[in-house]
Amino acid sequence: MQPRNAGTEGLRRQNTAAVLRALREHGASSRAELAQLTGLAKATVGVIVAGLEAAGAVVEEDSRPGARGRPGRPVALRGDRFVGLGLELNVDYVSAVVLDLAGTVLFGDSRPATGPDALTGLVRDVVGQRVDGREVVGTTLAVPALVRGDDRTVAWAPNLDVEGHDLAEALRALVPGTVQVSNDANCAAYAEAHHGAARGVRHALYLTGTVGIGAGILQHGELVRGGAGFAGEVGHMPVGDSAAVCGCGRRGCWEASVGLHAMLAAVGMPELDTPLRSAESVAARAADDPAVRAGLARVGHDLGLGIAMLSSILDPEVVVLGGYFAALGDLVLEPARRTLDERLASPAQVRPELRPSSLGIRAAALGAAEQSLGPVFAGERDLTA
């Protein structure tokens, strides 16, 4: 049986979340401005702001010129009290991002490494040195895997030796607050929607560019996850070289033609410690090596084949390419654009704009940190309690 005040308490949390979202989207605002932005009564806004100020979530700034009295003082989100922690465990690196309520990155780090032990070391360093004195409201771990709808169970990770609840349980022993696990492409796509190349885009698709290839599907800035939460597992579509062996054990998967290892094989260059550094080395060589440019053109062609297929199904306005794709830029995007033009079946179909990500190797960790703050802005986590 619900307590009598459940409805009232729920409404209070939703109103508080509306004020927090307005401050996040519009920046420092007076109480009167917050009332206009949220549609709440000025008195209600005043009570909410007082509670958030007491909790350390917001702070008053200096009065604006011409403003008289307390109501004219702008209120802003504080960055020194509540934070979200985002982590990524990938095939050959680990990353961490600490994000405050205002969306400012307080700390970010990536380390060439493999396996959960490397992630554990990074988490201990971050928690011990970077969040001291702040409250971690939640932690999200991004992994290149199918993650079930409970946001903690790894169902399938062909390029990592992890499964089940092990990662979530290990993190619970290391970090305060709630812990969830999410697909890396979904996390990176979410980062693009809030901080990167997909901001303000109604329908977008994000593609990772690491050893594996995954997709995050965005509609109005929110993730489309499908019935079981597995939407976006595009790396194993039968596109590209039908004889190429994939990390999943089958032949002909898309990532076996356009993943990091496939790209390096196409240009005959070794892998460095991170996908970004590998791609930067290839780009430098391509400047005066026609064989490298030809290899990248083949990769770009196969990339365009897959994007054409996805575009016919999902009809995105923008496709954001992350990981090594971003570092290579037009070396792979131009042949992908040409193939996309050739493969779209009808001239009525609008070719999506292909944009390189600007968020770098920590895109997934950034999106994971943003997701960790999600319950605060959705009214599910009460900072004033």
Image (tube, grey):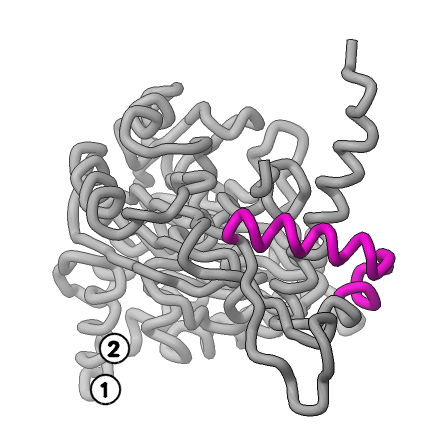
Which residues are the magenta region?
34-56
Residue 309 sits in quarter: bottom right
Q: CA distance from mark 2 to mark 1?
A: 7 Å
Q: Is residue 150 above or below residue 356?
A: above
Residue at horizontal 72%, vertical 76%? Answer: 69
Disc 1 secondary structure class: loop
Q: Position of residue 165 (x, y in %)?
A: 39, 20
Quadrant placement of the C terminus: top right
Say the numbered circle drawn on residue 319: none
**In the orientation shown, which residue stands out farthest toward the top?**
1
Disc 2 secondary structure class: helix
Q: Is residue 286 above or below residue 359?
A: below
Q: Which residue is mark 2?
A: 283
Q: Position of residue 85 (x, y in %)?
A: 39, 46
Residue at horizontal 34%, vertical 58%? Answer: 362
Q: Which residue is mark 1?
A: 287
User: Label 2: few (<14), some or many (≥20) within 10 Å?
Assistant: some
Q: Are marks 2 and 1 in contact (CB under 8 Å)?
A: yes
| Frontmost residue, 300 versus 380 | 380
Amino acid type assigned to the residue bearing label 1 in the image: Ala
Q: Position of residue 230 (x, y in %)?
A: 56, 34
Q: Is residue 215 above or below residue 144?
A: below
Amino acid type assigned to the residue bearing label 2 in the image: Ala
Residue 47 lies in magenta, yes or no? yes
Q: Is residue 363 visible?
A: yes
Q: Is residue 27 above or below residue 191?
A: below
